[in-house]
Amino acid sequence: MIYLASPAYGGLSIGTHASIRMMDTNRNYDVFEKNQDFSALCFNFNTMWCDMLNRRKEAEIDYWVMIHSDIEVIEVDWLEKLIGLLQYTCCDVLSVVSPIKDERGLTSTGIYDLEDGRVFERLTMTELDKLPKTFNYLDVVETIKPNLVKGHRNCLVVNTGLMIVRVDDWCEKIYFRTKDWIVKDTNGKFRAEFKSEDWLFSLDAFLLNKQVVATRDIKLNHIGINKYPNYGIWGTLLEDNLS
């Protein structure tokens, strides 16, 4: 059984609705669909996560799949492919890369520094073209970031826009959360800081010794003012300028 969560606030986009209905045309799995509207992002996610946990043993739920209300998948067999990639890589969390909704070509897939406690670099669409279609942290190190450490100092963090999780007992130890705080810099100026729910979910999974993998082997558009595809080389930035 697959638990398909589609969180929204104000309803699903036409593209997301079409993606879910397109999935129905060709599938070999039982799917429980849950659409829920809340403005509080993590509460929305966690309500459905708890519903999955409460149902999982009786319903024999094997996978949690989440698709955001601004994601348009453009492959008919995307669900089958998502499950196949998870099984092939033997990972626990697999995320389809999604660009940030602007012209820079940045994605929310990045590298987290456990010592500094922050994401110090996000991958660009230009960099992703050099990576395998499906990749983990070591692939990033060996292919495009040889300056990074191969040990446990860094880890890959991914987005939750279209993701699949292998459901097991470890899922009771993790949930979706954000972190907000303010800091005062050396010039005496205050600034807001933030850690997103997708990066923290990735980090928490990594700290539970779970394998986190990203893929571009499923094509999608991130819907904003325009449609931002996760395929092709595009964007004004070749590398991240995150400071």
Image (spheres, helix red, strand yellow):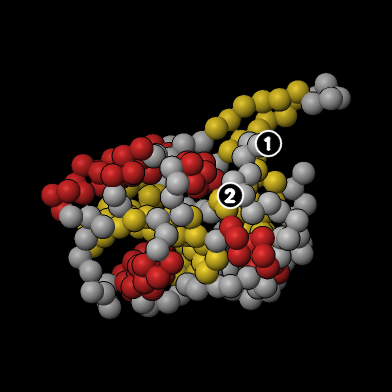
Left or right, residue 187 beside residue 110 = right
Q: Residue at x 58, y 73 (%)?
A: 132
Q: Which residue is mark 1?
A: 116
Left or right, residue 127 beside residue 159 = right
Image position of 80 with respect to 113: above or below: below
Q: Residue at x 52, y 62 (%)?
A: 214
Quadrant of the image for the C terminus? top right
Q: Secondary structure at mark 1?
A: loop
Q: Position of residue 64 (x, y in %)?
A: 32, 55
Q: Secondary structure at mark 2?
A: strand
Pointer 1 and pointer 2: residues touching (CB < 8 Å)?
Answer: no
Q: Earlier in the sequence, mark 1 or mark 2?
A: 1
Q: Residue at x 42, y 77 (%)?
A: 75
Quadrant of the image for the N terminus? bottom left
> Which numbered marker is on residue 155?
2
> Which numbered marker is on residue 61?
none
Residue 43, can we see it?
Answer: yes
Q: Quadrant of residue 180?
A: top right
